[in-house]
Amino acid sequence: MGYHMESPLYYASLLGLDSIVRILLDDTALTALPPTGDEHYGGALQAAWLGGHEKVTQLLIDKNADVNAQGGEYGNALQAASAGGHEKMVQLLIENNADVNAQGGHYGSALQAASAGGHEKVAQLLLDKNADVNAQGGEYGNALQAASARGHEKMVQLLIDKNADVNAQGGPYGTPSSLQAASAGGHEKIVQLLIDNNASDNWPRRDY
């Protein structure tokens, strides 16, 4: 991770130092502060969300920070909070109009981030706000393949219950399906669950 000479606001947000953030923001428009950002965490707001620092997040939002700003490994703040399993933070972001279907970042979407981490409550929050269960993109291709690859059986069931396409293609190294992802990971119960829900194992062989 390559840190640069970022502003005091960035570091205070990253560390959850709400009293320092409050001082830095006092009588200052957020847009007037020095630019913040890091290749891993993104801007100050995303850094606060990734760490689950709710007070800092609220302070930044009160200064009109853009909840949908893009940048960093996780693409946006909602994806960062979802990846970390920070349920309260996800709820706060949604209440402040975060786009549940925003694309970008390591996981492609907030739902895929939550699915990869096995964060069922976060995934349910996103789905309740109409997150696209079959959205494509990111490391695993889609949310079901992320949950299958990581071995999160309850998450797989939740996504199937929400009409995830068990035969959707995509993912790393050209892996065609959630069934292959689960098989490669040795997750027997998930393999059976997918087959029970009509996942096809009739995929063409690949020569490597």
Image (spheres, rainbow, N blue to C red):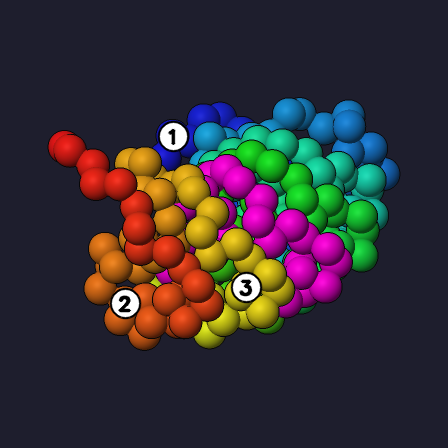
Q: Amino acid at mark 2?
A: His
Please state which of residues 162 and 30 is positioned toward the viewer in this rendering. 162
Residue 54 percent across, percent down from the top left: 67, 60
Residue 147 in view in this figure: no
Q: Give the residues in magenta.
A: 124-149
Residue 89 percent across, percent down from the top left: 66, 60
What secondary structure is marked by label 2?
loop
Q: Which residue is denoted by mark 1 in the rendering?
A: 2
Mark-to-mark CA distance, 1 and 2 = 35 Å
Quarter of the image where one finds residue 75: top right
Q: Which residue is denoted by mark 3 in the rendering?
A: 159
Q: Is residue 134 magenta?
A: yes
Which mark is first along the chain, 1 or 3? 1
Report crowding for label 2: few under 14, some 14 to 19, many 20 or more residues within 10 A (C-alpha).
some
Which mark is first along the chain, 2 or 3? 3
Q: Is 66 on the left or on the right of 207, as rendered?
A: right
Q: Is 198 on the left or on the right of 30, as rendered?
A: left
Quadrant placement of the C terminus: top left
Q: Which residue is denoted by mark 2 in the rendering?
A: 187
Which mark is first along the chain, 2 or 1? 1
Q: Amino acid at mark 3?
A: Leu
